Image: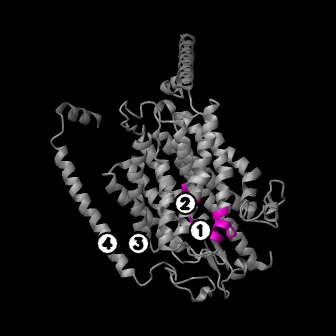
Amino acid sequence: MDGNLNALTTVFTEFYYWVTVVFMFLIHVGFCMYEVGASRARNHMHTLMKNIMIIPLVTVTFFFFGWWIYWAFPNFPFWGGLDTESGAANLPWADTMGPNAGDRITGVFWAAFLLFSWTAASIVSGSVIERIRSSALWVHAVLIGSVWWIIDAAWGWHYGGWMVRELGYHDAYASGVIHAIAGGYALGVIMVLGPRLGKFAKDGTPRDIPPHNPWLLTIGIFLIYTGFWGFYAACNVPVISPEGIDGQITGVTWTATNIYLAPTTLSGITFNFLMSLSGGLMAAYVISKGDAFWTFSGGLAGIITASAGNDLYHPIQAMIIGAVGVVIVYKLHYWMERKFKLDDAVGAVAVHGYAGFVGLVISGFVLWGVPSSPYEGYAAINPVGQFIGAIIMFFVLGFVPGWAVAKMQAAAGVLRIPEEVELQGLDYAEHHAYEDAKAAIIAADKEELANRGVAAK
Amino acid sequence: MSTNGYSNWAVDMADVGAIYPFQGSEVLMVIVGVAFWIGWHRIQFVREREHLEKARHTGDEEKVKAQLERY
């Protein structure tokens, strides 16, 4: 560290990202509660375990290769080779991938991206509950969490990514790079997986499968909101000097930036997070006629729709965009459900996938002509670039891999649980073990009590 | 041509103020926002009145008793 100001900035930035990581853990807690609340009692433990094990599996694979992909893939394979120089410091055997007094950022930056990886995998997990094999889901979790989403981040969420440079792609808080891709991936999987037994009547009419525990679901989504706030902070660079950016910005005034190192403010994104949440909640309440499930999810969809441009929108723009997105998402969800007989158990494809896609398209118009980067020669933000970006996120990197891998799993007979197990519930064996253990310990305690009574006499 | 007035970031941040799109339309945006808010109340009032009117005629005595017992 050169001088105390530099040292202070570095340690502040290290601590800043560390705090965001802790906040973002709440997203995963929220997803777990939401999934368990939405599932039926006979599937609780398996539903929970399916989501919990995403944490270690995505973490270790993100350490082994996911983080390297982010630094090596910004131009690979269409606009250049692998960036092995940048990638070298992020290989699992690099000395910066551990305690290193000369590098205080890699670990917390890695962790911030890792928490995004968990989120991407967890979004897929919610849509497939109560009928997917855990083994199949965990393969998908590694693929979406440590491969596909991080490729899209290298392309479209990196200051040197080809999508930013060539298309003017702008996605400050991940409408596309997390939500559209994960929603598209989930859509690909559930198209192959099929609906839960009983979801559709014989004439094709969809049946509602209400959540087992609406209170757990409510707390879950509120925790997701809270963690999402941390996510917003994690997407920013908190403070950086113009020479640190090394772009076109002149003068000596330091600034906060988005992931592309273009100026924004923490204050501005706080306005916009809350206003897009509010727009989403209000619109969802009206469009769903006060349905609690959709109203709460609508708040999330509102934020997701506005997220692509929430570094720059005016708060009222964020509110209106959040509201418009929710109306489109709600209508699209039911249209897709009826048309393709889809069972998106928690509305993840809609709330994340469709909202992310719509948000990217809207931002192309509202931010038309705004510079996508502080570097010279980059395309400005524009509707065509954002639309192509949305297609890449949702379909190319999301839907297609999810569908293809699910097809392979289905062909191998390792995708879906047997019908008998689906009917009796995934926790059937555990429930019996629990009842047996309970009966045994009660009997043992009673025997102990009786023996003491005899001894006392 | 840019919706926020900046077509590149070759600027001194000390001289930069608002960076949101459509600057100068703030009053119009507030009018649209307030209309959205008031409209929401209007829709909600009407819907709730209709819902409560319908609900007051749907109560089955036995089911109501069960609800009271449920607490």
Looking at this view, is B11 or B66 the one in front? B11
Q: Which residue is mark 3?
A: A316
Q: Which residue is mark 1?
A: A169
Q: Nearer the viewer, mark 3 or mark 1?
A: 1
Labels 3 and 4 share a subunit: no
Colour pattern of the rendering: one colour
Q: Residue A222: within the magenta?
A: no
Q: Position of residue A112 (x, y in %)?
A: 65, 59
Q: Is residue A416 visible?
A: yes
Please tell me whether mark 2 sits on a helix, a strand or a loop: helix
What segment is highlighted magenta in the picture?
A: A155-180
Q: Which quarter of the figure is the N terminus of chain A placed in?
A: bottom right
* Mark 3 surroundings within 10 Å by alpha-carbon count, few (fewer than 14), some (14 through 19), many (20 or more): many
Badge 2 or badge 3: first in the primary sequence: 3
- Asked if the residues shown at circle 3 and circle 4 are in contact, with their CB atoms under 8 angstroms apart, the answer is no
Badge 3 or badge 1: first in the primary sequence: 1
Q: Which mark is residue B34?
A: 4
Q: Is residue A259 visible?
A: no
